[in-house]
Amino acid sequence: MEKLGLSVILSIMMLMIPLIAQSKEGIPDHAVSIEQDNTYKQLSEEDPTIEPSEEVKALLADAKIEIDNPALIKLLNESTFSPSPFAFGYRAKVFLGHWPLAYDSVSSEVNWDFQVVNVNEVNNVNGDNKQELYYYQIEEKHVKGALTAKVSQSDQIKQMILQKARSEHDLPLTFHAVVGRETKSSKTYTVPTTKIGRLTATIPAVKDTGKVTIGEVYLELKGSNKEIVIKNVTKQDVGAYLPIANYLTFKFETK
């Protein structure tokens, strides 16, 4: 019986291995973390996720449209609305503004060859012996992400896309990645005689595309009850390129 139980447990574990592997980010062998070697110490961007208060959670639960805009949730958290329980017949509608409400991701893919930031080269055409080539960042490089469409309140929409993309990828996503001058790697590549060796370093990025929901937000007060009301709802196609901080993809070739 014990052997049977052990066999069942091992079988379940074997079935789970492919699922675990699929859940991890598929980082190729030629993509390398430079977090420890980067001479520019990249500050991690603050996670835009903001937890709503219990009162705001109740308001959001009753809303007919999903709201995940951190800026709007922050505003609701900081606001106090306490109509009197004895205010029978009391009515008010407070206009909170025109807001991006939620972002729904349709596709999210990693481009491991997003933007070239450095090229190292060794000319061994007339050499008598093989030579070694290694990565050495010649000058500081800044790679900035961007939205794929022109939208109002772009800063809020950027944060919403970043929030959603980070939930999909176990990678240090940002809108501004920097590789410091003189960043280098100890890994070497062999350049044979009669050849020119070239090592190209590229910053990868995630391209996330989807739709943003936009609408007018009202807080409606009826006696002691509060309710969020959304009007004039529209949707817009939008996406973003999000560089991956402290990662480089290397391509070595000889000619």
Image: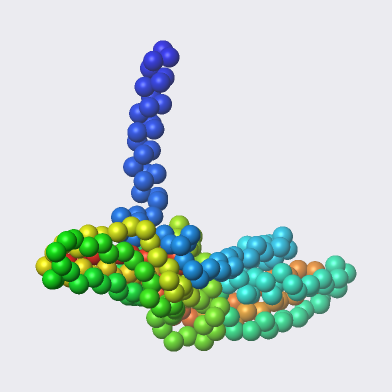
Front-most of 97 and 13? Answer: 13
Residue at screen point 13% across, 71% down: 126
Q: Is residue 172 above or below residue 103?
A: above
Q: Is residue 144 above or below residue 197?
A: below
Front-most of 206 and 182? Answer: 182
Residue at screen point 33% across, 57% down: 187
Colour mode? rainbow
> Horizontal and vertical percent for residue 245?
46, 67
Q: In this view, does 53 lie above or below 220?
A: above
Please identify the residue farthest to the front as the structure is shown: 128
Residue at screen point 32% across, 69% down: 201
Residue 41 left/right relative to 250:
right
Visible residue check, residue 135? yes
Please identify the residue farthest to the right as the structure is shown: 86
> Horizontal and vertical percent for residue 186?
37, 58
Residue 146 left/right relative to 200:
right
In which quadrant will I find the N terminus?
A: top left
> Horizontal and vertical percent for residue 9?
41, 26
Residue at screen point 22% across, 62% down: 131
In which quadrant will I find the C terminus?
A: bottom left
Res 96 → quadrant:
bottom right
Residue 193 left/right relative to 37:
left
> Horizontal and vertical percent for residue 123?
20, 72
Res 91 → quadrant:
bottom right
Please identify the residue farthest to the top as the structure is shown: 1
Residue 137 left/right relative to 194:
right
